[in-house]
Amino acid sequence: MKDTEKSMPVFGVGPIFVITTVLVTVISVVLNRRGALVNGKIIGETWIFTALEIIFIALGAYLWLASVIGSKINKNAKEGKLITTGVYGIVRNPVYSAFLAISTGVIIGERNAALFVVPLVLWMFLTILMKNTEEKWLYQNFGEEYLEYKRSVNRVIPWFRKK
């Protein structure tokens, strides 16, 4: 990184995505529990939804802890370092992925098919947000190093590195 460049903001566009995700999730839950979405209710065996809810929320908690605490994101962002190891080796935006996973778990726990579109809409919103903000900044500051990282690690969905 050049001396004249600023370090990446610690929060980036995170507050926009996190606040939007929390609000959309809360509104979805409230609408569902007030009976506004009765046509999508899933009735019958629901243990699979409980299991998926727990898995997604646990995944979100893990991603958040591993990125914020394990990878020392605040320290590295202030120092202008591109983090590509640890949890950042399986997903480029683990903090945002964490909130998306937790929201998905909560939505699944509501057991209403009408709400299953919410995580998809949030994923699309995050994708557009990242492409137009942080990804541009990272490319400007890290160039080819970031492009190589971007080619091998998914933006939001945790996955093993592509070779």
Image (tube, rainbow, N blue to C red):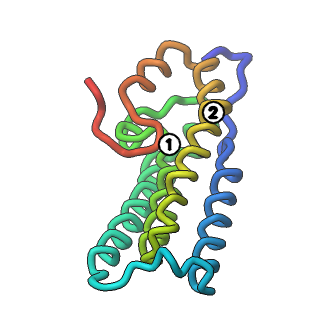
6 w.r.t. 74: above or below = above
Q: Position of residue 118 (x, y in %)?
A: 54, 60
Callout 1 crowding tier (Cα within 10 Å): few <14, some 14–19, many ≥20: many
Proximity of marks 1 and 2: CB atoms separated by less than 8 Å: yes
Helix, strand or loop under label 2: helix
Residue at 68 percent of width and 60 percent of height: 19
Nearer to us in this view, 71 or 39: 39
Helix, strand or loop under label 1: loop
Q: Position of residue 141 (x, y in %)?
A: 62, 20
Residue type, label 1: Asn
Residue at 45 percent of width and 59 percent of height: 101
Give the side of residue 159 with respect to residue 10, left or right. Answer: left
43 w.r.t. 66: above or below = below
The C terminus lies in which quarter of the figure?
top left
Nearer to us in this view, 158 or 28: 28
Q: Position of residue 99 (x, y in %)?
A: 53, 58
Nearer to us in this view, 12 or 33: 33
Q: Position of residue 1 (x, y in %)?
A: 60, 18
> Mark 2 highlights which residue?
134
The image quarter containing residue 125 is top right
> Mark 1 highlights which residue?
93
Callout 2 crowding tier (Cα within 10 Å): few <14, some 14–19, many ≥20: some
Give the side of residue 39 with respect to residue 10, left or right. Answer: left
* Residue 147, label in figure: none
